[in-house]
Image (spheres, rainbow, N blue to C red):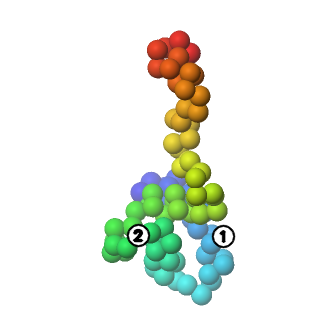
């Protein structure tokens, strides 16, 4: 995991961890993984799972995942023109 991902994870983790100050780091990761729907072993929890869960936890259920939103075409006509190279 690169430094910027570690920094991003720590930045996202801090407000949640302040609400659960009685937990140690492993317990916090277990809690987040469980809340994200991960049922496997703890060593299978990825940084992506934690980061996206922390980013999306307060978003509406139908919200688009950050990073994918830029690729979503809402207007079908715009999408066709873009695919043809006209836009």
The percent position of residue 23, horizontal first and vertical second, equals 55, 84
- Mark 2 or 1, closer to the camera: 2
- Considering only vertical position in the picture, is 34 above or below 86? below
Which one is nearer the viewer's eye here, 48 or 87?
A: 87
- Considering only vertical position in the picture, is 6 above or below 39? above
- Badge number at residue 64: none
Count of residue discs: 2
The percent position of residue 69, horizontal first and vertical second, equals 56, 41
- Considering only vertical position in the picture, is 74 above or below 56? above
Extreme residue in the top direction: 86
Quarter-wise, where is residue 41 in the image? bottom left
Instruction: Determine the secondary structure under disc 2.
Output: loop
Instruction: Determine the secondary structure under disc 1.
Output: helix
At 63% from the left edge and 57% from the top edge, which residue is drawn?
60
Callout 1 crowding tier (Cα within 10 Å): few <14, some 14–19, many ≥20: few
Labels 2 & 1 near each other (Cβ < 8 A): no
At 64% from the left edge and 62% from the top edge, which residue is drawn?
58
Q: Is residue 49 visible?
A: yes
At 63% from the left edge and 58% from the top edge, which residue is drawn?
59
Q: Is residue 29 visible?
A: no
- Considering only vertical position in the picture, is 5 above or below 68? below
Callout 2 crowding tier (Cα within 10 Å): few <14, some 14–19, many ≥20: some
- Residue on which disc 2 sits: 38
Q: Earlier in the sequence, mark 2 or mark 1?
A: 1
Extreme residue in the front direction: 76
Please indicate whether residue 43 sits to the left or right of residue 28 in the image.
left
The percent position of residue 7, horizontal first and vertical second, equals 55, 59
- Residue on which disc 1 sits: 15
Give the position of the N terminus as an image quadrant. Answer: bottom left
Cα separation between marks 2 and 1: 21 Å
Extreme residue in the bottom direction: 22
Give the position of the C terminus as an image quadrant. Answer: top right
């Amino acid at each position: 995991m690169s430094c910027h991902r570690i920094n991003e994870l720590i930045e996202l983790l801090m407000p949640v961890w302040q609400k659960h100050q009685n937990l140690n780091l492993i317990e916090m990761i277990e809690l987040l993984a469980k809340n994200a729907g991960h049922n496997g072993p703890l060593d299978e929890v990825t940084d992506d799972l934690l980061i996206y869960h922390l980013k999306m936890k307060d978003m509406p259920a139908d919200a688009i995942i950050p990073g994918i939103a830029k690729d979503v075409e809402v207007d079908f006509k715009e999408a066709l023109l873009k695919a043809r190279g006209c836009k």
